[in-house]
Amino acid sequence: MRDKLTPKNIIFCLCICFLPLLMYGIDGIERFLSIDFGWPGGDYVIRIVVRACLYMLLAVGLNIVCGFTGLLDLGYVAFYLIGGYTAGLLMQRLGVPYWFALPLAVLHGTVWGLLRGIPTLRLTGDYFAIVTFGFAELFFRVVRNEQWLIGAPNGQLRGIPSPSLFGITFNQNWHNYYHILILLIFVVFITYRLQNSRVGRAWVAIREDENAAESMGINVGRYKSLAFAVSAAIGALGGCFIAQFQVNISAPFFEFWESILILCMVVLGGMGSIRGAMIGAAILGSLGEILREVLTVLTRFTEYPELVGARYLIFGIVLILLMRFRPGGLIFKKT
Amino acid sequence: MMAQILEQLINGLVLGGIYALIAVGYTMVYGIIQLINFAHGEIYMFGAYIALMFIVMGVPFWIAVPLSMLLCAILGMLIDFVAYRPLRNAPRLSALITAIGISLALQNLARMIWSARPRQFPSESLPSFFLSEVTQTGEVINAILLPGGGILPFRDVFILLLAVVLMVVLNMLIYLTKIGKAMRACAQNAVAANLMGIKTNHVIAVTFAIGSALGAVAGIMVGLSEVVTPTMGYYKGVAAFAAAVLGGIGSISGAIFGGIVIGIAEVFGADIHSGYRIAFAYIIMILVILIRPSGLFGKSTSTRA
């Protein structure tokens, strides 16, 4: 796909680049006019946007295994966890600067992606899914139980320092926005290049028919391993970001349902499409926040505190309905 | 020491019986439609909650259990009818994602209806022989005194016996009745069975009903000895799936054997490190899948698509 510099595209890019300015601008207008028109505040909105971008990054990463090679990965959150805790521990315990912790954490995630990938190469479908699930769950248990490593029960890691460069500490919300934006653009660029290369075509060939791909001379094991490694690296990158963004992380951040949420995003957008994964993540990532707000308000009216759980109920129903009526994804229909 | 091991072994057996009941549900469905029914764990959780609800409403225990089994059987068939039947010919990945969607929806539905707070069966509404205790004079009530000082509550004996009885009944159903024959035929080759005049969809619905009813019993049994929470299905469900994989998925005797092995492994694993209690089941499962995907009793196939 080759995008041209049409006026629409230029305006879109400018909006993305100056989004924080727009958001804080509304704050300013509100203060200037001293009218409260219900704007939740620039910082809050930026945080939601940052979260949505993070989910876009993760969805693009998961899409490599789920969408390109067609293997259902239920344990993607494991790499997110590995990235988060590696970066968090390196920075908080050893005082390693973020810019060194980041590549180390990504490397660590990649190593585990390969370690998980090699024995599961010959598995397909359900068995691959269940092994990935078990793998992620084991990591979750380790983080929750190994106090000597994390320093507190339940995987609580507090006070992860913000990255700094030339004496500037990047701890503002708009810093984080540009931070994740750069990471996201980098990852999307790489995945597009991979998709449109020999590697991407090999992945799709494996998805469509593994035996046929192998007989055409594609080294299935090598290309699958590469997919696992790239996907794991992107997951770990997301983990690095969340560690410094949240400052305090704990085990519940990396529960099984987080994997499912990311999977929902990929499925919603249509598996195998980078743009689809990103749009799916943008919708569900922000929908989650909006639903949380709406449901909290509803809770106040109905005095029914369990309504907040309806968020995941809705995600579940979305998955069922999508598979029933639009298995190719809501946004992009696979041919 | 020996007495402790004996007691833990019996605890493992009891837990294994429960796992076997759940694992049978996974293995039967997988045997016929080659789908990991992720929602099975949630059905088992619903079984516990429905029975709990009836008991709180004042329904006697012995009526609440069959009622819960019946409702769960209906729930199982409903899930099959609404979600899985339209996807019979769709790619396997679609059905698997649907199963996850149902699991997610049901778990959070339960959280909304019954709240996330762990609950227990009210002990005064249960049959009196479930309440075992050791009096101050050292007298053991409603329990068997094991050699070495451990006690085995009647409740655990009941769970184990019930599991055995249900398994025997299930085996009779599968090997002696007409519907059992139809189920075995579908498991061997669903298309050929259909050509021979077996209504495949009916057979699948019955399979879901039986599996769900057994799952409901397991849920109630867990509720008796532990607590009832919306997430119980997720943890125990995967451990039970591990049992089904260990025994060889599709094989019922394998599921029973696998359930007992996983149950014992979990109880002894909890002695080593309680935080990794459930992790032992996962480790066994992963190793079995990697080393011998067909399980201990399953027919060996080159690949499982």
Image (cartoon, rainbow, N blue to C red):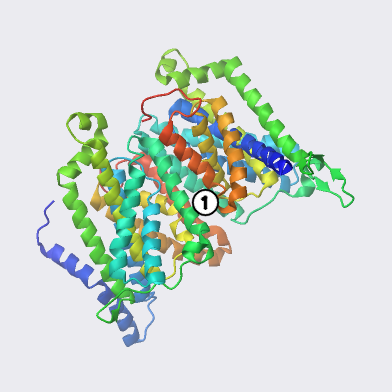
Q: Hey, which residue is sitting farthest right in the picture?
A: B137
Q: Chain of mark 1?
A: B
- Give coordinates of residue A31: x percent, y percent: 34, 85
Residue at which label 1 appears:
B108
A57 versus B149 height, above or below: below
Viewer-nearest residue: B35 or B2: B2
Relative to B211, is A319 on the left or the right?
Answer: left
Viewer-nearest residue: B242 or A20: B242
Can residue A335 be spotted in the picture?
A: no
Residue at 52 percent of width and 35 percent of height: B78
Can residue B184 be spotted in the picture?
A: yes
Q: Secondary structure at mark 1?
A: helix
Viewer-nearest residue: B107 or A254: A254
- Give coordinates of residue B132: x percent, y percent: 80, 45
Q: Residues within 10 Å of mark 1 (few under 14, many from 20)?
A: many
- Give coordinates of residue A244: x percent, y percent: 36, 69
Residue A222 figure quarter: top left
Quarter of the picture holding the C terminus of chain A: top left
- Give coordinates of residue A11: x percent, y percent: 16, 67
Relative to A157, is A122 on the left or the right?
Answer: left
Q: Hey, which residue is sitting farthest front in the picture?
A: B1
Relative to B278, is B228 on the left or the right?
Answer: right
Residue at 11 percent of width and 53 percent of height: A2
Residue at 79 percent of width and 48 percent of height: B124
Count all numbered tags in the image, as a single digit: 1
Amino acid found under the numbered disc labelled 1: Asn
B162 versus B173 height, above or below: below
B120 versus A31 height, above or below: above
Q: Hey, which residue is sitting farthest top in the picture?
A: B196
